[in-house]
Image: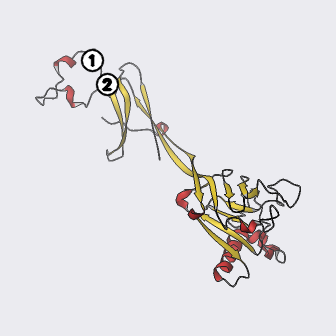
């Protein structure tokens, strides 16, 4: 027994689910960049970071403001509040495998603890990183201001950078952060699609059973003698979902059989997400 859904009986919506991760330096790919390095890898990662993340905040904008109009991964020209003014000749950029964050890192969930330098760094939900235990600061303004931020995080691609080069406690420089032992904590985002169906059975519909155990074993499709009375209702135990070729896609099993009413409409809500 089948019944087709109407558009009003189907609904689809999405939401973001988040999973917590804790990784150490062995699970993070780190590259130190240096613009004038004899090491071709360090020099190439400087250009990689400049072009893909910091073009609008690089030293090239001093002589050519045209670069300020170029959208990059870091600056999408959407006034997101990310600071890109600290891109110097050296720094580091780190990458997290996409399998460890799915569709992105949840803003405001990132923290880095560097056990070598004792630096503790978090994000401000806008793409900026700042130290929570810095002894020195560039100004008396907020720690996450454009003066005091120490790097950036690019949530969509699972990358973060440390671009500040000054000292944060008089003994350790920010350039040393992520060069030794450290760990990061964050939440990865995963978009979940939920499908919702309202399965309606009117009083004159779906009143027959397909449970073969209620029929005589002689194969005549006759109900057993003890089930022929009018007081014995049909029970609903499962709701199946079928495609256009009547192939079963899935089913929802009720916690207990529900007698099918022949007097009032009945509605069952079936929800599936993945």
How many callouts does the rendering have? 2
Residue 190 seen in the current view: yes
Label 1, residues with CA under 10 Å away: few <14, some 14-19, many ≥20: few
* Location of residue 72 in the rendering, given as x and y in whole percent from the top left corner: 69, 67
**Residue in the image at 38% along x and 18% along y:** 263
Residue located farthest toward the left when viewing the structure as drawn = 218
Q: Which quadrant would the N terminus be assigned to in this image?
A: top left
Label 2, residues with CA under 10 Å away: few <14, some 14-19, many ≥20: some
Residue 12's place in the image compared with 104, above or below, is above
Element carrying mark 1: loop
Element carrying mark 2: strand
Residue 79 seen in the current view: no
* Location of residue 15 in the rendering, given as x and y in whole percent from the top left corner: 57, 45
**Residue in the image at 33% along x and 36% along y:** 2
220 sits left or right of 150 in the view:
left
169 sits left or right of 205 in the view:
right
Alpha carbon distance from label 2 to label 1 = 9 Å
Residue named by callout 1: 232
Disc sitting over residue 235 in the figure: 2
Way the structure is coloured: secondary structure
**Contact flag, marks 2 and 1 (Cβ < 8 Å):** no
* Location of residue 122 in the rendering, given as x and y in whole percent from the top left corner: 71, 54
98 sits left or right of 163 in the view:
left
Disc sitting over residue 145 in the figure: none
**Residue in the image at 65% along x and 83% along y:** 40
Q: Nearer the viewer, residue 112 or 245?
A: 112
Residue 156's place in the image compared with 267, above or below, is below
């Amino acid at each position: 027994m089948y019944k087709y859904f109407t558009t009003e009986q189907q609904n689809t919506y999405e939401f973001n689910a988040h999973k917590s991760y804790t990784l150490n330096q062995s699970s993070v790919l780190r590259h130190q960049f240096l613009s004038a390095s004899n090491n071709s890898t360090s020099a190439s990662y400087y250009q990689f970071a400049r072009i893909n993340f910091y073009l609008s905040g690089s030293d090239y904008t001093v002589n050519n403001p045209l670069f300020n109009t170029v959208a990059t991964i870091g600056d999408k020209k959407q006034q997101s509040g990310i600071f890109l003014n600290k891109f110097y000749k050296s720094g580091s950029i780190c990458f997290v495998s996409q399998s460890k964050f799915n569709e992105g890192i949840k803003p405001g969930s990132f923290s880095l603890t560097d056990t070598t330098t004792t630096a503790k760094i978090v994000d401000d939900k806008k793409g900026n990183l700042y130290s929570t235990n810095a002894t020195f600061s560039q100004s008396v303004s907020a720690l996450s201001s454009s003066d005091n931020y120490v790097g950036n995080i690019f949530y969509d691609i699972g990358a973060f950078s440390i671009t500040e080069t000054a000292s944060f406690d008089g003994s350790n420089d920010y350039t040393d952060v992520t060069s030794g032992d450290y760990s990061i904590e964050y939440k990865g985002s995963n978009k979940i699609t939920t499908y919702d169906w309202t399965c309606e059975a009117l009083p004159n519909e779906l009143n027959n059973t397909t449970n073969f155990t209620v029929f005589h074993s002689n194969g005549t499709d006759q109900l057993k003698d003890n089930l022929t009375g009018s007081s014995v209702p049909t029970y609903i135990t499962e709701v199946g979902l079928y495609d256009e070729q009547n192939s079963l896609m899935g089913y929802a099993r009720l916690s207990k059989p529900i007698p099918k009413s022949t007097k009032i409409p009945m509605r069952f809500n079936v929800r599936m997400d993945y």
